[in-house]
Structures are given as structure tokens and as C-alpha cells.
Amino acid sequence: MKILLKDAAILYWDVTLKVIQNGYVAIEDNLIKSVGSVSDLHLLEWQPDRVLSLPGRAIMPGLVNTHNHAAMSLLRGYSDDVPLQTWLERDIFPAEDCMTPEDVYWGSLAAILEMQKSGTTTFADMYFYMDKTAEAVLESGMRASLAKGMIGLGPNTQEYLLGSREFFDTYHLAGHGRIQVMLGPHALYTCPPDFLNEVIDLASELGTGIHIHVSETLKEVEDSYRQFNKSPVKVLEELGLFEHQVLAAHTVHVDDSDQKILVEKQVGIAHNPVSNLKLASGVAPIASLLAQGGLVSLGTDGAASTNTLDLFAEMKLAAWLQKNYTGDASAINSEQILRMATIDGAKVLGFDRVGNIAAGFKADLIVIDLNQAHLTPHHNLASLLAYSVQGKDVETVIIDGNIVVENGKSTRIDEKRVVAEMLERGLRIKRDATEGMTEQRKQL
Ligand SMILES: [Zn+2]
């Protein structure tokens, strides 16, 4: 399939952010063939199968959400306004105990639909029944970095390692390379050092990366000092984890020496500002990490803790938060935010040639309708995209050269069916979890 998009403003990355005001993008199969000004279009001797004329639109690289638990969309609004431990132990864990593989499939598909319609073309996930999430990814045309969640406590640790190995063998590079598989040890507090050493060995053997929660809460860091007399970042560094490609979710409570390690080792950070605020976890020092040369990307976390998977909402909040956290309105700018949400997100996940609109890159891009009152005038395109656009402004989405959303409608997913399944499954999970709730859990 050859698709030509033209007459739009095109935002892409050179060394810095660049804009072609009246530009075109030529897509052939799954790759971007050429990008340029419409005035040079006659030089491109090439016959497209489809032409989309897009005046008044912006085309930008598809967004990359680097931390999610997609199937948690089934638990959206299930528990709010309670402390993290209550949220997790009283509400979320019992509900997850009631989830079936089919629930994870539908929850993942609903999350993918929400992400695609709001401009996300790649996401990273860690959860259980991950083969069902992989199925949803393959069917929906999405790009994803998937990790089977692993717990290194209890009697089943070897099964977790074996499960991850099998998942890697089955799904790594599936869907013409749209899926990449990472290993997903949940966190240091659920995966002791001996287990993490086995994870590191497996990562070396498979040549893949590691997705792990790091220093999300103060309690986690205090427990680490109590147990190891050092921070989680320091423990992980000494284990040699950071010699591998690592995706570290949250890094909220990282002191100066932790930050130095994260920057030196170029650990990929997934910053999840909405989730961190909702659960009162704190504010990650992202501006400081960026100023030191750290590799930072943006994630939503699961819908149970973030309530919406619109990455545009995360972008704006991430910026506002750093400005207030540092007391400096210039601490972070729209270009840095857009970089985190696109090309640096792809880099963090280890996707090659993803996250930019340039010849030879994978054709993952989104079209945004700027012909709307809340998106005018067009003083500064980067500012509009980082701070004013909402997910619902995304009109068309292309992933790996395929149009997956056109004029706001999915071309791959039956939205009515998804809604019906989510309503029914959500009710059932709530009923089962509530009836099964033990007295001890109610006390939490
Ligand atoms: Zn998480």
C-alpha cells in the first residue's frame, strides 16, 4: 500500500524539532519513503494508492506510552480517593484475582482502542496473561513492548522465568516486528536479588531488556534502606541490572546519587505523572534528570491509577508539574515534552527507527485537526501539540503503514462490541471481588 498525506504541517525531529508548514509524507508498505514540502512533490516520481489531503492539520510522530498495564482498563474508576496501600491491597489485588484470560484480552483491546484513538501508536505493558494482550496487539495493528509480570517471592519463581522465556520465544518480533518482548520483574520489593540475578542471566541469554518498577513510593525506598542499607537504584546497579537495557517505571524518590547512576547508565525512565499524583506517590525529578542528560519518556500506568490513557494529558501535566516542583517556569519546555512522548519513548523501548517522521522510519504517525477553536491561532505548533491538543483531536492514526483510525473511527476494532464486553466483564469482576472479599481485606 502506498499512501500520500499532503497539505499539512509536519512536525519531525532533526537535531532539534522542525516543522514543514505545507508538507507531504509518502508511505510505502510499512515505511516512510519520503518527507518534504508540497512544492517539491513533483520531484517524487511515485504513484500512491491513496491520497489524503489534510489542510489545517498537523502530522506528528505517533505517541509512545512507555508504561501501562493495559487490561487494568477493566478497573477504571474501581477505586479512587484512597491511600495507595488500601487501593492496592483492599481493592485492586482482589479484583485482579477475579480476572480471566478473556478479561485480559478485552481489557487490553479496550485500552488499545483508547490509546490509538488518542494518538498512541506504541505502548509498553507489564501484566499477567500477557499472551492475551499480545493477541489484542496483533489484531489491532498496534506496536508494543510486552513483558510478562514476574514475582520473585513464593514457590513459583522458576515458573515465572520459564513463562517469560516461552513468551519471548512465541511473541518476540511477532506481527512483522510490531511486538518486542522484555522481561518484567515487577519491582525490587517483590523480586529479591537472587531472583533478579536469574532475570539478568535470562536477559543476557535472550538479548533483551528489562521492564521494572523503581522507587515509586517513599515506603519502597525506606524498606530498601532497612533491608539493604541502600536505595533501590543502588541495589539494582550493584546487581548489574543497568548493564542491560532497562525500562524503569516511576523513579519518583531518587536522590542525587541515584540520579547520577540513572543518567550514567542511560536507564530508560518511564515518567507517569498522573498516576503518581493520584496515588500521592510524589513528583519524579524529571527536569533534573533531563538537565543531566537522562533518558526520560512518558507513560500513563494502568487505567486503574490514571483513569484515562490519553498521553496528551500526561504531556501537559508533566510540564506543569516540573515547573512548579522546581519553582522555575522554564525548567522544561514543549519541545522536551514532545521528545519524551515520541522519539525518546521509542528509544527507551529499544524500537529501531520508530518515533520520527523521516525517510526510512516506520510509518507510525498521527493526524491532528487544528481547525478548531481551542487549537487556534497557530503561533507555535510545538506548544499547541504539547499543551493544547487533547486525545479526541486525533483524526487519523497510521501504524506500520496501516490506517488503524480514520476520521476518529477505528478500522480494526469493533468499538460497540468492546464497550458491551467491558460493561459486562466490569460488573462481573466487581461482583466476584466484592463477594469474595475477606474480613481481613475489608479492614485494610
Ligand atoms: Zn506500573
Image: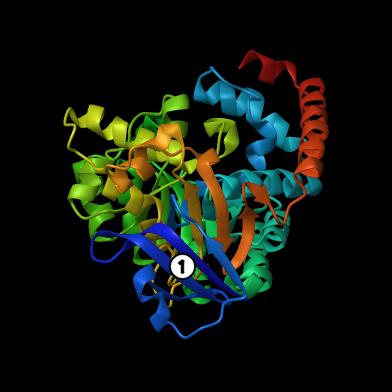
- Does residue 171 sit above or below 233 in this rendering? below
Q: Is residue 326 visible?
A: yes
Residue 264: image location, x then y, percent: 23, 59
> Would you call the spot at circle 1 few (<14 residues within 10 Å), some (14-19), or many (20 or more)?
many
Tell me where residue 377 appears, x and y as whole percent.
33, 38
Please give the name of the residue rendered at 21% of the width and 51% of the height, measured from the top-left corner.
260
Q: Residue at x 18, y 48 (%)?
A: 291
Give the camera-side residue of 406 and 324: 406
Q: Is residue 26 left or right of 140 when viewed as pictured? A: left
Quarter of the image containing the C terminus?
top right
Secondary structure state at the residue bearing disc 1: loop
Q: Is residue 235 above or below residue 419?
A: below
Nearest the eye: 336 or 345: 336
Relative to 67, residue 162 above or below: below
Residue at image point 39% right, 83% down:
43
| Foreground of the two, 405 or 341 | 405
User: What percent of the width, then of the height, locates residue 44?
Assistant: 43, 82
Describe the colour scheme in one phrase: rainbow
**Residue 169 placed where, x, y %?**
65, 73
Left or right: residue 249 compared with residue 93: left
In the rendered view of the protein, which quadrant contains the N terminus? Answer: bottom right
Residue labelled 1 has its Cβ within 8 Å of some atom of ligand 1:
no
Q: Which corner quadrant of the image does residue 392 belong to?
A: top right
Residue carrying label 1 = 351
Picture quarter containing residue 141? bottom right
Vertical placement of residue 87 versus 165, above or below: above
Query: Three-letter amino acid code at disc 1?
Result: Phe
